[in-house]
Amino acid sequence: MDDPIRLGLLLDSWTIETWKFRLVQKLLCLNFLNLVSVEVRGKRKKNTSILSLHRKIDKKIFKPSVDPMEMQDAQSLLEDISLQEEGELDVLIYLGDDEVDETYLEKATFGLWSMIHFNKTSGPIPMPGYREILRKDPHAVSAILVRDKGNLKGRIIQKSWSRIDAKSITRTQEMIYAKSISLIPRSLEALHE
C-alpha cells in the first residue's frame, strides 16, 4: 500500500481508559496513516462492580505508576478529526466494550478491528487481569480481532501473551495493556507494507 492508511476510530464515549488514550496518541504519531474519522456512539456505563472495589484497594497497596483503567478525556485530542472526510476507510478501529452494529463492518476495506483479551480457560473477557489472578492462570492473551462483511465472528490477526502478577490486578493490567498498545500499530504497519 503506497498511500497512507485511512483510519477511523469508533468510541463508545469521549471518556476512555488510559491505555486506549495512549494507543490513540501512538496512532496519531504514525507517519504511514491518516486518522480521518472519529465517531462517538453514546454514553459509557459506569463500572460499579466488586472489581472496582478490588482495584481501589489494589491501587492503595501497590501504588502503580500508571493505572491503565483510569479514565481520560479524549475529546481535546480528537475533536479536530471528528468530522468524517469523504471516501472509504481502510481500517476502522473500535475502542469500546459493547457489541457493534453490523453496519460498521461495511465502513472499512480491511474491516473493523478491535482488541480482545482472553485466557486459556475462557473466551473474551472485558477487563483482563482479575479473573486470571483468581483462577491462578499463568498468563492472559491480548489479540486483534478483525470482522468484516464476509466474517461476522471475526478472525484474530495478531496476539501476544502477558504474564500474570499473582498479587496485583493493576500491575497485571499494566503489563497486559502495554502489550495491547503495541499490537495495533504493528499490525497497521504490516498492512501498509
Image (cartoon, grey):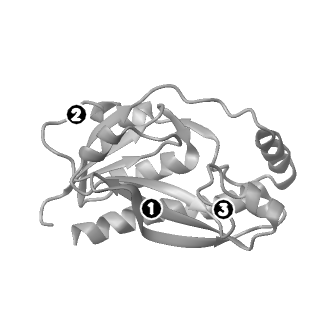
How many numbered discs sit on the rendered protein?
Answer: 3
Name the side, left or right, on which 73 lies relative to 136: left
Percent position of residue 24, x then y: 42, 48
Measured Cα–Cα span from mark 3 to mark 2? 37 Å
Residue placed at 63% from the left, 54% from the top? 125
State the mark number for residue 144: 1
Q: Which residue is mark 2?
A: 84
Spatial CA span between label 3 and label 1? 17 Å
Q: Residue furthest top?
A: 43
Q: Amino acid at mark 2?
A: Gln
> Dot 3 lies on which element?
loop
At label 1, the amino acid type is Ile
Estimate how packed mark 2 is, as few (under 14), some (14 to 19) or many (20 or more) residues with alpha carbons within 10 Å.
some
The residue nearer to you, when weighing 59 against 95, is: 95
Residue type of the residue flagged with mark 3: Ser
- Indicate left or right for 170 with 69 as reference: right
Name the residue: 83% across, 50% down. Answer: 58
Distance from disc 1 to disc 2, alpha carbons, whole Å, reads 24 Å
Callout 1–callout 2 Cβ contact below 8 Å? no
On residue 122, which mark appears?
A: 3
Q: Residue at x 71, y 58 (%)?
A: 129
Q: Quadrant of the C terminus?
A: bottom left
Q: Upstream in the sequence, badge 3 or badge 2? A: 2
Dot placed on the residue nearer the N-terminal end, 3 or 1? 3
Q: Which mark is residue 161?
A: none
Q: Earlier in the sequence, mark 1 or mark 2?
A: 2
